[in-house]
Amino acid sequence: MAVTEPKGHGQHAGMWVFPDAAVMTQDVGEKTKAMPRPFTTALAVTGIFFILGIVGFIARAVDDGFDDIAPWGYYMAIFSMVFMVTSGAPLVALAFRFTKSHWRRPLSRVAELFSIVGILNLLMFIPLMFLLPGIANPDAVIEGELAVRRTIWFEGPIGAPHAWDLVGVAFLTITSLTILWISAKPDMAECRDTATGFRRWLYNYLAGNWYGTKRQWNAQKAGLALLGAFYFMTLIFMHFVISSDYAQSLIPGWKDSIFPVIYTITSLQMSLGAILVVLFIMRRWGGYEGYIGKSTFWSASKVLLGVTLLWVYHLFAFFITFWYGRLEIEQNVIKYLVTDTYAIIFLLNLIFSFAAPFAVLLWNPVRRSAWGPALAGVLVLFGGLMFNIRIFVGSANAAPGAELYKAFMEHVPAPVYPDIWDVFMVVGGLGAAVFLYLAATKLMPLISIWEVKEGTLYQKWGKFIRGEYLILGKPE
């Protein structure tokens, strides 16, 4: 057993845990190598979904090709959802590490492992390069001038927008993988002596020069800080670019400086929600209860509640700007994305991204539990799926052909419902992301061993007068 008795009583029972650092490496290593039946079943099911997604993609490519973006709306939506979750998750770990939050130690590696799924993002984005229409319409000449699509690329540098978008997604993927490597290097070095097979070779290759010297620890700290700052800047820029190029620029006349902010906030909300879901599964069924106390869920739920309120505030700011503008194009955008064409999807988005998680997280007893924040995480993930379907399916089908290059959307388009290939691609995209994450957990420990061990040095359970309290030291 790698833990002592969880401390706390009453509503705080199990709130704090005190892992045994002496046996932690061996215990986590055994859990990483283990292949219990529920895990293999989940791996098989998500693998089947992955295959269905590939079938749907091939069938869509054969039926419709890559000349028109409209049939690929649901593919865009599922790419965006996977991109939002996997790009935002490493930032969650970085942000809480920068603030030196003690409770975040069990979730750091859970968040960083989403970087491996970022490889899927990069592969899924390549077809989108060919689908995005050019800035200038080569087939339409109006009054002697080429029809131009309204985008953020004012000067139109060479390769814009396609090549620059691809470079940005690739940089984001590479940076997040580098952060994972630097963070996991001490753990791989510690586990390489007991690992076997491919895992042993991988640990030796990636952590061969790590011996835990003071200079190496200082270099790791500085590297994570510098890469974290670079990752944050790149992430915000790419959220702005993707939301602008693949959403706003495809609806003629949609000009909104608030939407990219909503996109980023939705990404952070879904990322934190996904992390809480993984933590709950680890604690409830994965045997990590001795490493993950309820304090992690309690603290993270407060952040999730704040992000949820921030989401609805920016949604209101988006809506009220167009509502009071009262221009015909602004009214059409609201009708298309909110009140008419995709009204049901918008209602589901509002309920699951705000109303339902807000109602769950509003209550202190629920926030103090492990299941309450995880339930809120499931809700916001479904709400994020509705958000992406509403935005990207709507954008892909708003203006077919040459109408895309007009200045305004002159009428409100009809909704586009999914066919069997769309369903396959949506299910397959989600299945592929889960499949890769599950596979990643067998390569890297799900717990950041060095951070949790460090945490054991700063905490103890003590008494003061008649009460019992967690005594927490601060390293800096």
Image (spheres, rainbow, N blue to C red):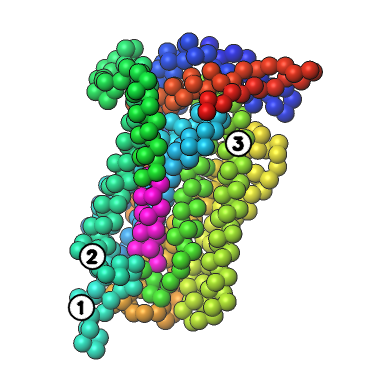
| Marks 2 and 1, how far apart at CA | 21 Å
> Element at badge 3?
helix
- Residue 279 coordinates in the image, percent (x, y): 52, 32
Q: Residue lying farthest right?
A: 466
| Marks 1 and 3, how far apart at CA | 56 Å
Tell me the kind of residue under disc 2: Pro
Towards the viewer: 93 or 47: 93
Q: Residue 139, which numbered label?
A: 1
Q: Nearer the viewer, mark 2 or mark 3?
A: 2
Q: Residue 375, which numbered label?
A: none
- Residue 328 coordinates in the image, percent (x, y): 49, 82
| Residue 298 higher or lower than 405, as above or below | above
For disc 3, the marked residue is 299
> Element at badge 2?
loop
| Marks 2 and 3, how far apart at CA | 45 Å
Q: Residue 157, which numbered label?
A: 2
Which residue shows up at 34% across the image and 63% down it? Answer: 245
Tell me the kind of residue under disc 3: Ser
Q: Nearer the viewer, mark 1 or mark 3?
A: 3
Towards the viewer: 178 or 6: 178
- Residue 300 coordinates in the image, percent (x, y): 57, 38
| SS majority, magenta | helix
